[in-house]
Image (cartoon, grey):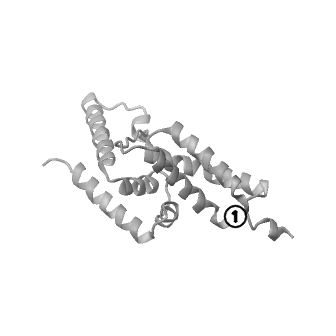
Amino acid sequence: MEENKLNNVCEESTFDGLFKKLSKSIRDFLYYKSGNLELAEDIVQDVFFKMWEKCKDIPPEKAKSFLFTAANNRFLNDVDKKKVRLNYKNSVSSRVNNEDPSYQLEMKEYKEQLENAIDSLPEGQREAFLMNRIEKMTYAEIAVALGVSQKAIEKRMQKALLKLKEVLKPNK
């Protein structure tokens, strides 16, 4: 009998479990794309509501893919073709730094340069890079979330890393 309940996400405990497990990842995914935490949180609520409305049609093993796809589609429908800005905290700058002022200035300039370099990546490369490096997702997990092949994610990461290396290389 228990298996019949697991054929869709209408069971309240299954739905709640999915929300607890995936809502933060989806929110972070959307935040990396938009740079807007409020928008990301609104979309998360909307896609979970949409999943609840269609719960009879969604088996639990397809829920993650459904949610990420719905979130991505909703984001793409809501956002104009503005340049996406990313504001994230750098763990190095959050520590108290007792280094000399010139070192602090260099670090601040490097952080700005890094943010600009990440910002300048094409959207697909930026998403893959941030999901891997910030969210600590594997290439396979990123591929599922974005609905592309793992090879595509590998290629995006390779291109992103090459571009960042090129932009951030020290001046000789």
Element type at marker 1? helix
Q: Quadrant of the N terminus?
A: bottom right
Specify few, some or many for label 1: CA neighbours under 10 Å numbering under 14, 14-19, or 20 or more: some
Establish if 108 lies above or below 161: above
Q: Residue 124 location in percent, x, y?
A: 38, 57
| Residue drawn where x is 24% and y is 31% of the image | 102
Determine the residue positioned at 46% across, 65% down.
139
Figure label count: 1
User: Does 11 sit left or right of 104 as displayed?
Assistant: right
Q: Position of residue 161 (x, y in %)?
A: 31, 58
- Using residue 62 as the reference point, say whether residue 154 is left or right of it: left
Residue sitting farthest toward the top: 101
Of 99 and 44, nearer the camera is 44
Q: Residue furthest right?
A: 1
Q: Is residue 48 left or right of residue 157?
A: right
Give the amino acid type for the residue marked by disc 1 in the picture.
Asp
Residue 10 point in image, percent of width and height:
76, 58
Q: Is residue 114 above or below residue 144?
A: above
Q: Residue at the spot x=39%, y=41% of the render?
A: 86
- Which sits in the foreground, 118 or 105? 118
Residue under label 1, please give it. Answer: 57
Asked where in the image residue 162 lies, by quadrant, the reply is bottom left
